[in-house]
Image (spheres, rainbow, N blue to C red):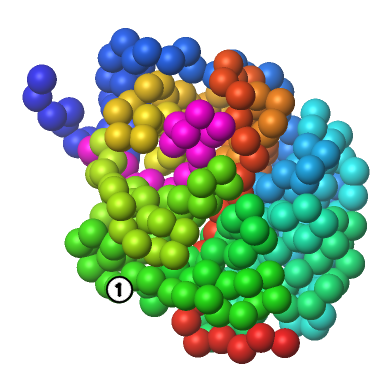
Amino acid sequence: MGEPVRIGLGAAVFALTAMMASAGYSDTPPTFVTSWGEPGMGPGQFNGARDIALDDSGNVYVVDSQNNRIQRFAPNGVFLSQWGSEGRGDGQLFFPEHIAIFHDRVYVSENLNERVQTFTLDGLHVGYLAILGTPPGPIDVDANGNVFLVLPEVPIIGKLSSAGALLTTWGTAGSGPGQFESPSGICVDRSNGEVWVTDGITERVQRFSNDGTYEFGWAGPPPLAEFGAVEVDGAGHIYLTWNSQVTKYDRNGNVLTSFGGPGFGNGQFSSISALVLCHARCIYVSDSVQNRIQQFDYDVGIREHTWGRFKALYSVK
């Protein structure tokens, strides 16, 4: 089969989506359940819906970047609470982008304040995990409470203790194994400690040990497939976002199923910014252009994860 004619991003994505949908993959795509959100500044509205994380009760925390706040919803999308205001003080936010939750602690990274703050589940400021000299990216936490941060502009991955002590870093600029050009997503498999990292520019995903040893990786499907967020389910399957699509892979990089595509209907996306898997066999996907969250049901038991980034020159309070 010849390569699709490249006649613009939307057309290329549509052609690739149709091609994948007809490929006869073994797994059934997830089923759309509901959606919530719209542009605005009120409760349940978003101005740049970015990262998502879940607490142990299944509540959904959404980073509302340009409103400089975090919003919390029930699993069915009912608004519960919010916190944050624009600023550089303790507990204030300045273009937050990424979030991770570990039991009673919430970690939020801020692009313009170049730091990672720690909050309670109710939004009370606890302290700072790290104060950085470069914008932090996605965050995730392993089963021991260690925090993994992506620093996309360096580019490296950093592993910190829950108190902010630097444990290790890995990565250099490049396209070889263990290198990065622009790391864009991270997920720690809490069952075995493996760390999965996506790279938007080199269009690939890499797997590392918990301490950063390179193990495996594969490239994304062309054309224009810049991987973004990454998640791992309870069976070890990998979920990757690229453009307006979510694709599920096995551990060896074989595609199992895919869903999404460009559009504003149910199950369609304009710009996927994050996804998260819940214990109750569901998937939440955020869209920063449409400013909404969509929920899907799935037929595999899955384990909650979040994702994130880190940076090199930092101090800890």
Left or right of 142: which side holds 209? left
Q: How many marks?
A: 1
- Of 14 and 75, which appears nearest the observer? 75
User: Which class describes the residues within 10 Å of circle 1: few (<14), some (14-19), or many (20+)?
Assistant: some
Q: Vertical placement of 133 versus 251: above or below? A: below
Left or right of 203: which side holds 268? right
Q: Vertical placement of 245 versus 135: above or below? A: above
Q: Quadrant of residue 290?
A: top right
Residue designated by label 1: 172
Residue 93: in magenta span? no
Residue 313 visible in the picture: yes
Give the magenta-colored segment's residue range: 222-238
Residue appearing at x 62%, y 36% in the figure:
303
Q: Vertical placement of 301 versus 108: above or below? A: above
Residue appearing at x 39%, y 77% in the figure:
154
Q: Amino acid at mark 1?
A: Thr
Residue 98 visible in the picture: no
The C terminus sits in image quarter: bottom right
Residue 98 placement (x, y as % from top left): 62, 59
